[in-house]
Image (cartoon, rainbow, N blue to C red):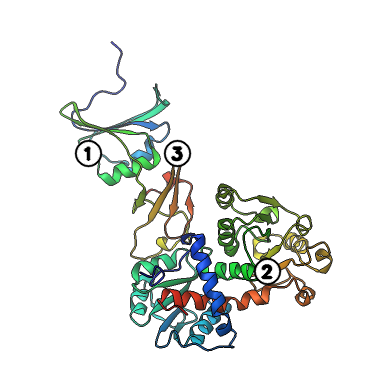
Amino acid sequence: MRELRVTPIKNGTVIDHIPSGMALKVLKILGIGGSVSSTVTVAMHVPSKAMGWKDIVKVEDRELSAKEVDKIALIAPNATVNVVRNYNVAEKHKVRMPDRAVGILRCANPNCITNLREPVESDFAVMGKDPVRLRCKYCDRILEDVAAAIV
Amino acid sequence: MDPWKGRDILSIRDFSRADIESVLEAARKAMPIAQGAKTSRSLDGKVLSAMFFEPSTRTRLSFESAMQRLGGRVIGFASPEGTSIQKGETLADTVRMVESYSDVIVLRHPQEGAARLAADFSSRPVINAGDGAGQHPTQTLQDLYTIWEGRGAIEGQTIALVGDLKYGRTVHSLAFALALFGAPLILVSPPELEMPWEIVEGLKETGIPLQATHRLEDVVRAADVLYVTRIQKERFPDPQEYSRVADSYRVDLPLLREAKKDLMIMHPLPRVAEIDPAVDATSHAAYFRQAFNGVPVRMALLEMVLGVRG
């Protein structure tokens, strides 16, 4: 039997098919930093039939919010999210790129009004999905580094 | 229902070609009133709030002239000094207050996207009079009107955009609008000040003939319109480099010997040294007419968004 690099989890979420190198960004989206209270497993540069190489993130005892999934879709458009309950995959779905990204990105234009102390959420229209291209509703600028703009 | 009544004028990207043509037609009708040859009271009793968070002589005065020529009134401020903004009030709060005092808001603001934010918080129409390095749609419409009225059409006119194509906000919006009309464009700039890639990509997608060069003298023969913009000193770390570049983009009489007889020269003003004053006396000079055209265009827009057709 082939040895599994990553053991199955009892309850939690497995995010698979993350583009190679983006796993740490996914952790950042999930707010996983230095201190965690449940097991987090990160596999980077794993061979993949479909993608060549991929990253995988497993987070035990946690299911993701819709907003978190939207954020992941922006940097990992082909990721799959598996919700595991009692060792079984209870739900499995591909992330879906939203048409708009509201309140999940910071505009990279320092002179954009949304970066001031105003009572508005950032709002981006998704112009293209592959590669991901987003345009700020307010200042019209195209966001180039999506991963760096995630709040 | 009137699709213009209550509409915000925020970005030229919100306009279709037919929208722009409606504004141009209305501006032509407003011309005799703008010139003072006829009078109108079409906006009698209406109040315009001019919120100018940074100074702008031409834009502010042309809006005031437009409103007053139509019998309306103007309140507002010409700079943020002494207003509640200096006490730290948000733009959103200022707008909510001002909309209750007036029928239409004209906003000039140093931050990009400020006008769209203002529109989110105002039930009255908001007209963007320039937001930072972002949009300035009434300037674009005034430029389009000048070409349309001066040449009889925009479609098919070869237009050379000259100077600072990187930072100059007017040229980005203008290029987009000219592409809507299918006008061939020639982009003429020093290598340091070329048009940003995302704008060039957008122009290419429209399928218009597009050419880019660093040498003004190469294009002067082909152009129907030269749209000249200011090259700012602060864009260059080395003053000598600035003088070299500024010299090579100066429009003067020797350069114009090669030009078409009916070449039109435009400039959003203020100009510094981009156009030799000797050009002013030639039939090519259209920049002062262009500055005046801000009045009929703004009259047209004010009447349209206030639901009054002149």
**What is the chain identity of the residue bearing mark 1?**
A
Task: Estimate the x, y position of residue B49 in percent, counting from the top left.
Answer: 42, 80
* Residue B265 as seen in the image, left or right of residue B19: right
Which circle marks residue A130 in the picture?
3
Task: Estimate the x, y position of residue A21 in percent, counting from the top left.
Answer: 43, 33
* Residue B78 as seen in the image, left or right of residue B161: left
Q: Quick check: B31 above or below B180?
A: below
**What is the chain identity of the residue bearing mark 2?**
B
Which circle marks residue A63 in the picture?
1
Task: Estimate the x, y position of residue B296 in percent, counting from the top left.
Answer: 55, 78
**What is the chain identity of the residue bearing mark 3?**
A
* Front residue (pair B35, B165): B35
Q: Which residue is mark 2?
A: B266
Q: Which residue extends farthest left?
A: A86
Residue B307, quarter of picture:
bottom left
- Residue B52 seen anywhere in this rendered image of the structure: no
Callout in the foreground (2, 1): 2
Does label 1 or label 3 sit earlier along the sequence? 1
Marks 2 and 3 in Cβ contact (< 8 Å): no
Residue B62, quarter of picture:
bottom right
Q: Quick check: B124 above or below B164?
A: below
Which residue appears at 18% of the width and 28% of the height?
A10
* Front residue (pair B224, B171): B224
3D distance between C-alphas at marks 2 and 1: 60 Å
Please state the total of marks drawn on the protein image: 3
3D distance between C-alphas at marks 2 and 3: 40 Å
Q: Quick check: A20 above or below B32?
A: above
Q: Secondary structure at mark 2?
A: strand
